[in-house]
Image: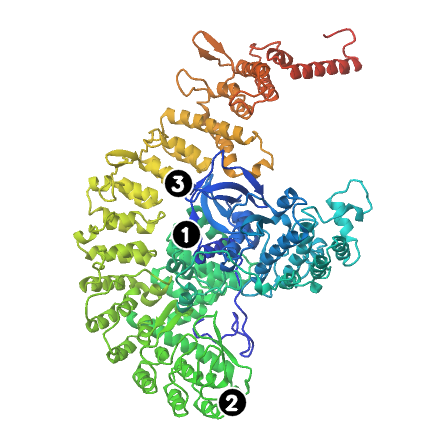
């Protein structure tokens, strides 16, 4: 942390100990968001994927997802869509393992696969399956993540080998195995253990090239749900031990040894893959048949199961499988091939992991060097090297040698900014609101757990606070920001402790007495009374001096010469705890200002000696603010213009000198070659929540060092760059803007404008309670000096600012801008086609940000009700439709409160298309939005002109949870027809889905694993029947002369519906009447059975639409209805039995069944002596 003399997260360690690396946080949800921000995926919606009865079938099932076949509409390509079966528990976790349960193991594994398949080297490899994109949806109100993977009609490698049994030569088989080796080798080089290597987890594709006129085949490794990814921050640390597929695991996994091994690291995990790969090769060479030979066991024809086979393997002597494999290889009678196969087996099938080869060595054993494996897969070219750009901007750039992960060195702001710059921010913004909230719940669970490593726990709390400042999760709650900032401080997260008291002061919240915030409290107390304009620069000086004096005490103690004996180095976190520098004694003496020691150390230390991060003694003299030491170093030829690894020169560090020494220090540095033009990379300065970059004057501007700015400004060779104005405007340093403007010549550049916050707390730290006044004065200066105008493209600068605003201070900035700008400017609409005024941009902001309410309310005052209601502002789309389409609940409420008609549709060419509630239901509806629209009178029965569907129908067939549907309809009174139609629509959808997918009334555990969309309608209908507002209409027909639900259920022989309706109180004694004819539900079922039997006599093919109906099912329905009548003694079917029903339907098997049951009963009765004097025929 900023100039923190510490060698680890704890400050009481001796100064010569090596610092501890920052930890990686195990956060599935954040790893997911991190993947979205760093990898170039294609994001699809369900509408872009074609799923219907002809193109969708269950293609397979992994341990954690359902795989279906779909089509990408735009390309017509078939794809495999792997959708996670997400767990969705509503609880607040209190233990670290609880965070895993927030989204469930299914989500965790799909995210893991997303991270692996999204890596650049994986995407470019020919022998690893391609990820085409992903899809975010909500099913039954639950966010669902689906991976869209290239589809192979040839199936898995096992299926391909079995289907082509004996058609492939041994050499061809060996080549297929080699391709699997290449894929695994690429994964292992990224420190990824597959975890379930088998030929079932490899797919076969046709090759685009042919070999001697024959088709070629490409093998691609797939299914990474069990994979293990090395921790980038601790690649040698322990990793989870996961079981693969039984009989194909390494011995140490099968016997449980790895699970108990405290030293089980990624290298050990990779060796388990190697063993499994040996079995992979063996089964390939056996044409897809299992490697296990029953003759080994001596059972010879007797039945044996997996348990017996595992027991046999566990009792084999050492390397016995290698022996069996050797026998198999020799049995091929293919000498060159057998020898190569033997080398593969010898390198893989050894019991002791340390004796196994690496995958690279195995690839060579195949006869091809690992580095010659060509990676030919074509991936989209990126014209920009984002890695280099992000490195310069100070982001924690992931190298390509391992899989990226979230860690304690990362800030949520960095992640969002990185995504924004690379063009991926839209993916983060499209994360469903419910999922955003669950991400927060997961982070909170990690933050409050006493079991989580303290630094990781503190960072989790800090991330929660950052999320609330951005409105991630839907709320800009400053109280929550302060609360979680305090939690982070109490967990020992240094940055939080340093800024906690200042943020509390700024937002006028009483701070808590937290042990982790003592240093920040002392800092704040010492700066009381400092003018706001001087606070930040004084804070930097005071804090650096405090750290320096603490270091002096620890290093020098009572003997200043003790520094001479510290040959191992001294460690200093200069700006961020994530980057720790190693100092030589000369550097430490220069930093501490010990001139005598510096003079002595210069005799034995080269004057240009650098620290680990590239700083020399001159840098450290500036860090300590010691002008006299700097002069001493200059006399001993220490370079004063050297740039560090981040291109920081001593002149950049002039911000650490006292104001009285600044002019002399700057002159000295310039005289010795320091340049005013050297630009640094971005430096993240945690203690003050700063992000600084650029030339020395930019460092002065961004640290609000007005004295230094006034010294450097006249020395510039040309007028200020527009970027400098941005530096002052960014965090509302109005007095610096006043200093810069007189030097600025020419028109304002397009890049100069009001800016959104780039750090969560900088503005609060710099201004304290005066941040509102600073915003007002900055905005006024911008307006008066033409900065709030138009771009060269004719776009409103305020419009650009609106779309990028994201924090409370941003929204306050917008309000100030509205106060100073003219009505014409605010109502301005650009010259380009489809351009829209500012209000459309504002109302189209995603999510319901209550913090934007004041801004939105102000904007509506510039328009009449007619303008707000019709489509003139948004190219035929009315403004309410815009807000609804973006799920902006706050914006929609403002318009409805203003009097906008909730049912007014937007029109194109005079044709009404869709009203707001229909727009909502066609998208990804938030329950809050639906409830709001219903509250203001949305017509649930109005048909859409495009689809002829009513909002009620869309509500019932959409992804909204049934509990939310009930709450929405319960909150506001509705006509009876709404309740009747709700029941019937739900009933119809339930019947259709259960017929289509064969789901019973009481699903088994296996059935519950089916996609939630399919079980949703069962639960929906069941819940409606339990609600008294709906169940009272259970016997109402949909139309006056129509049939009731129980009559319909009996007629279509739908047993689940019959049971549910009868249990809910449906009246099965009510006949269906048509003219003079009436027929009861039981009779309807029997009639359907008789018709089926008659049709069967004429043709063996079932009647269209009755394929699902069997005569046994008809008997079940009829029996259910019969028992209902008999239980009520209604006299309608007295004396009737199942046998009578079977006779009525001419159901021979049923007649036989019930006759046998009757005779068996008579026999038993007589046997017990109960019917000696009675005969029953």
Can residue 1027 be seen in this snapshot?
Answer: no
Give the CA separation, mark 3 to mark 1. Answer: 18 Å
Residue bearing the label numbered 2: 561
Q: Quadrant of residue 670?
A: bottom left
Quarter of the image for residue 277 reads bottom right
Mark pair 3, 2: CA separation: 71 Å
Which of these two is toward me, 648 or 816? 648
Q: Residue at x 47, y 78 (%)?
A: 550
Is residue 148 at least partly visible in the picture?
A: yes
- Is residue 585 or residue 551 the one in the foreground? 585
Q: In terms of secondary structure, where does tag 2 sit?
A: helix
Q: Nearer the viewer, mark 2 or mark 1?
A: 1
The first of marks 2 and 1 along the sequence is 1
Horizontal side of residue 162 vs 939, given as left or right: right
Residue denoted by label 3: 925
Instruction: Give the residue number, with chain letter if any, for mark 1.
Output: 427
Report the mark closest to the observer, 3 or 1. Answer: 1
């Amino acid at each position: 942390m900023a100039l923190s003399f510490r060698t680890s997260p704890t400050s009481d360690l001796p100064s010569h100990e090596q610092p501890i690396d920052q930890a990686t946080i195990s956060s599935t949800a954040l790893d997911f968001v991190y993947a979205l921000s760093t990898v170039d995926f294609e994001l699809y919606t369900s509408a872009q994927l074609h799923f219907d009865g002809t193109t969708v079938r269950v293609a397979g099932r992994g341990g954690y997802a359902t795989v279906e076949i779909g089509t990408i509409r735009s390309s017509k390509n078939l794809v495999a869509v792997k959708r996670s079966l997400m767990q969705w528990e509503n609880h607040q976790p209190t233990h670290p393992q609880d965070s895993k349960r927030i989204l469930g193991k299914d989500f965790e594994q799909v995210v893991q696969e997303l991270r692996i398949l999204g890596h650049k080297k994986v995407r470019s490899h020919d022998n690893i399956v391609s990820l085409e994109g992903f899809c975010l949806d909500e099913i039954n109100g639950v966010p669902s993540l689906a991976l869209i993977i290239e589809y192979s009609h040839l199936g898995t490698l096992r299926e391909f080998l079995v289907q082509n049994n004996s058609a492939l030569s041994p050499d061809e088989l060996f080549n297929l195995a080699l391709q699997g080796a290449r894929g695994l080798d690429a994964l292992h080089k990224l420190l990824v253990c597959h975890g379930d290597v088998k030929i079932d987890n490899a797919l076969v594709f046709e090759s685009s090239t042919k070999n001697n006129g024959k088709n070629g085949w490409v093998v691609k490794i797939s299914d990474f749900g069990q994979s293990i990814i090395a921790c980038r921050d601790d690649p040698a640390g322990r990793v989870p031990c996961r079981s693969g597929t039984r009989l194909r695991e390494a011995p140490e996994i099968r016997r449980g040894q790895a699970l108990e091994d405290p030293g089980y690291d990624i290298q050990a995990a990779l060796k388990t893959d190697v063993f499994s790969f040996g079995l992979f090769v063996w089964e390939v060479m056996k044409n897809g048949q299992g490697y296990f030979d029953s003759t080994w066991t001596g059972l010879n024809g007797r039945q044996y199961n997996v348990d017996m086979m595992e027991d046999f393997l566990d009792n084999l002597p050492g390397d016995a499988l290698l022996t069996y494999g050797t026998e198999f290889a020799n049995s091929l009678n293919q000498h060159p091939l057998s020898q190569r196969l033997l080398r593969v087996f010898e390198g893989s099938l050894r019991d002791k992991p340390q004796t196994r080869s690496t995958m690279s060595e195995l690839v060579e054993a195949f006869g091809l060097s690992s580095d010659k494996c060509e990676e030919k897969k074509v991936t989209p070219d990126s014209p920009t090297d984002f890695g280099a750009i992000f490195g310069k901007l100070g982001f924690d750039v992931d190298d390509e040698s391992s899989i990226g992960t979230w860690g304690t060195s990362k800030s949520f702001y960095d992640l969002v900014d990185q995504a924004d710059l690379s063009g991926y921010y839209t993916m983060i913004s499209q994360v469903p609101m419910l999922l955003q909230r669950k991400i927060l719940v997961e982070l909170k669970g990690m933050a409050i757990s006493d079991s989580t490593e303290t630094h990781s726990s503190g960072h989790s709390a800090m991330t929660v606070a950052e999320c609330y400042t951005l409105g991630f999760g839907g709320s800009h709650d400053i109280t929550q920001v302060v609360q979680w900032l305090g939690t982070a401080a109490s967990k020992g997260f240094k940055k939080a402790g340093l800024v906690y008291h200042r943020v509390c002061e700024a937002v006028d919240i009483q701070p808590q007495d937290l042990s982790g915030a003592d240093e920040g409290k002392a800092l704040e107390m010492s700066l009381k009374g400092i003018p706001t304009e001087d606070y930040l620069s004084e804070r930097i000086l005071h804090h650096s001096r405090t750290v320096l004096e603490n270091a002096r005490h620890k290093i020098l103690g009572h003997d200043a010469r003790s520094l001479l004996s510290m040959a191992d180095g001294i460690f200093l976190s200069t700006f961020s705890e994530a980057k720790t520098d190693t100092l030589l004694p000369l550097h430490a003496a220069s930093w501490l200002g010990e001139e005598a020691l510096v003079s002595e150390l210069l005799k034995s230390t080269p004057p240009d000696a650098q620290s680990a991060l590239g700083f020399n003694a001159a840098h450290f003299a500036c860090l300590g603010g010691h002008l006299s030491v700097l002069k001493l170093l200059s006399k001993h030829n220490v370079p004063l213009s050297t740039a560090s690894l981040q291109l920081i020169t001593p002149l950049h560090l002039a911000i650490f000198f006292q104001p009285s020494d600044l002019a002399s220090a700057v002159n000295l540095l310039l005289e010795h070659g320091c340049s005013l033009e050297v630009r640094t990379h971005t430096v993240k300065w945690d203690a003050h929540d700063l992000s600084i970059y650029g030339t020395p004057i930019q460092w002065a501007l961004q640290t609000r060092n007005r004295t230094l700015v006034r010294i450097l400004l006249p020395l510039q060779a040309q007028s200020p760059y527009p970027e400098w104005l941005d530096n002052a405007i960014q965090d509302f340093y109005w007095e610096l803007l006043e200093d810069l403007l007189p030097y600025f010549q020419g028109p304002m550049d397009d890049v100069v404008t009001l800016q959104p916050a780039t750090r969560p707390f900088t503005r609060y730290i710099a201004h304290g309670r005066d941040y509102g006044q600073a915003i007002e004065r900055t905005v006024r200066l911008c307006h008066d000096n033409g900065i709030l105008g138009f771009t060269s493209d004719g776009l409103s600068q305020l419009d650009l600012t609106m779309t990028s605003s994201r924090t409370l201070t941003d929204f306050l900035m917008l309000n100030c801008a509205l106060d100073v700008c003219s009505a014409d400017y605010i109502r301005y609409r650009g010259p380009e086609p489809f351009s829209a005024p500012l209000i459309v941009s504002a109302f189209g902001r995603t999510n319901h940000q209550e913090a934007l309410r004041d801004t939105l309310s102000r904007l509506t005052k510039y328009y009449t009700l007619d303008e707000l209601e019709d489509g003139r502002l948004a190219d035929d789309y009315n403004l309410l439709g815009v807000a609804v389409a973006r799920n902006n609940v706050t914006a929609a409420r403002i318009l409805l409160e203003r009097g906008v008609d909730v049912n007014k549709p937007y029109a194109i060419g005079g044709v009404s298309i869709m009203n707001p509630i229909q727009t909502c239901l066609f998208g990804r509806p938030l329950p809050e939005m639906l409830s709001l629209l219903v509250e203001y009178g949305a017509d649930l029965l109005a048909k859409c002109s495009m689809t002829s569907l009513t909002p009620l129908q869309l509500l019932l067939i959409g992804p909204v949870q049934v509990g939310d549907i009930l709450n929405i309809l319960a909150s506001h009174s509705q006509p009876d027809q709404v309740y009747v139609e709700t029941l019937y629509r739900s009933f119809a959808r339930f019947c259709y889905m259960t017929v289509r997918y064969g789901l019973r009334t009481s699903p088994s555990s296996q059935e519950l694993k089916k996609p939630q969309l399919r079980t949703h309608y069962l639960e929906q209908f069941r819940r409606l029947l339990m609600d008294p507002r709906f169940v009272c209409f259970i016997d109402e027909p949909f139309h006056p002369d129509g049939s009731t639900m129980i009559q319909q259920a009996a007629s279509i022989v739908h047993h689940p519906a019959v049971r549910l309706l009868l249990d809910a109180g449906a009246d099965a004694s009510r006949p269906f009447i048509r003219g003079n004819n009436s027929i009861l539900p039981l009779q309807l079922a029997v009639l359907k059975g008789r018709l089926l039997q008659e049709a069967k006599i004429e043709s063996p093919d079932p009647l269209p639409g009755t394929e699902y109906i069997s005569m046994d099912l008809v008997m079940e329905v009829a029996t259910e209805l019969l028992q209902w009548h008999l239980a009520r003694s209604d006299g309608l079917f007295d004396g009737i039995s199942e046998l009578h029903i079977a006779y009525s339907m001419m159901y021979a098997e049923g007649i036989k069944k019930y006759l046998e049951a009757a005779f068996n009963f008579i026999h038993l009765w007589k046997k017990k002596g109960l019917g000696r004097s009675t005969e029953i025929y």
